[in-house]
Image: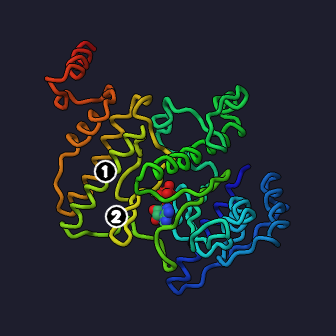
Amino acid sequence: MDTTNYFEELDDQDLTETLIAKGKRPARTPAPNPKKLAEPLRQFVHAQDDSRAAFKFTYKAARFEEGWLLNSLGDFYEHQWISDVLRRVKGGKEASVYLCRAGAEVNAEFIAAKVYRPRSLRNLKNDHAYREGRDNLDNEGKIVLDDGMQHAMQKRTEYGKNLLHQSWIAYEFTSMQVLKTAGADVPEPYEMAHNAILMSYVGDLDGCAPTLSEISLERAEACGLFERVLYNIDLMLSKERIHGDLSAYNILYWDGALTLIDFPQVVSPMVNRNAYSIFERDVTRVCEYFAKQGVKANPRKIASDLWKKHDYRFGPEIHPSLLDADDERDRALWQKLKGR
Ligand SMILES: Nc1ncnc2c1ncn2[C@@H]1O[C@H](COP(=O)(O)OP(=O)(O)O)[C@@H](O)[C@H]1O
Ligand SMILES: [Mg+2]
């Protein structure tokens, strides 16, 4: 479905909110005329009209945003995972996160709904670097084995693109499940749908928790939190996962505790040939933030030590200075690198 118009409308809405905040009167954006919309989008707009009666929410959404929310969150409402959408807490490049009131099925007051922009995830730069060696997952988080579906994804048909979009979301959801069970500091994942994930909400009614990038820490506290991030990175490695986009922008801080978020691009240290460089970059970005808070560390050494601890193979980008001359496997790798 081509929803470009929808997002133009949404972006207008973002601008409108900004102008109102500045006390300016925005130019009125006329409501789109369904007759002028492309056929798939027209069906989409009309399809929303029936379900609207049942699912009404407090959040005042722009016209198309409302349609998109009904489409993305309708199932969650029907199954009583959420009872209301209260506000949009973050609008990002790839997804928007909404604060929802939890429904009867969830033992919590609030819940976060991450709703993806249409197929936004496939626009990730170098997405093949992340997808390398990675199976595609279906809407239940199972590996896609069906020939027709695989063909559609390879050929990048419309259907195939939708399947790939679903696969990114499934990776985010299933990774959170595995990591939460392992005891990592990640939100509790509740449910996933074709375009959204429900998870525990970090924050309060006034807004979501800040990311580390938004705050400064006292050195003493920063030391403890840095250790905690490393603990999580180590735990992720033990579950064969590398975050792939870890930085102060994807770590929330609330009541002195951290929560790692944003997992669609997770990478396997076993099968992805770029794994080590992606891993080292994650560790480096984390160290860069904590260096600004007064915690000095050597990211290359930390990354290399953690990698070796879990016995993963170093990829082609490994720097020779990180190899251990006393380690037989490292010596063998060194011979191999020299021979290229
Ligand atoms: N579980 C959550 N609770 C509270 N806020 C969240 C939660 N998950 C995400 N957010 C907020 O939404 C923003 C975007 O979410 P994220 O998963 O990082 O998606 P994106 O791909 O758009 O960066 C985050 O930076 C954070 O501010
Ligand atoms: Mg993010």
The residue at 34%/64% (across/down) is 212
Horizontal and vertical percent for residue 225?
27, 61
Farthest residue in the top direction? 339
Please, what is the three-letter code of the amino acid marked with disc 1? Tyr
Instruction: Classify mark 2 as within 8 Å of ligand 1 or not, answering yes or no.
Output: no
Nearer-N-terminus badge (1/2):
2
Farthest residue in the left direction? 326
The residue at 33%/27% (across/down) is 313
- Which image quadrant is residue 335 in? top left
Horizontal and vertical percent for residue 13?
62, 71
Q: Is residue 28 above or below residue 194?
A: below
Farthest residue in the bottom direction? 23
Please, what is the three-letter code of the amino acid marked with disc 2? Leu
Q: Is residue 268 left or right of residue 225?
A: right
Query: Nearer the viewer's eye, disc 1 or disc 2?
Result: 1
| Residue at mark 1 | 231
Q: Which mark is residue 212?
A: 2
The residue at 25%/54% (across/down) is 288
**Local SS, label 2:** helix
Q: Quadrant of the C terminus?
A: top left
- Which image quadrant is residue 94 in? bottom right
Horizontal and vertical percent for residue 285?
30, 50
CA distance separating discs 1 and 2:
17 Å
The residue at 85%/66% (across/down) is 50
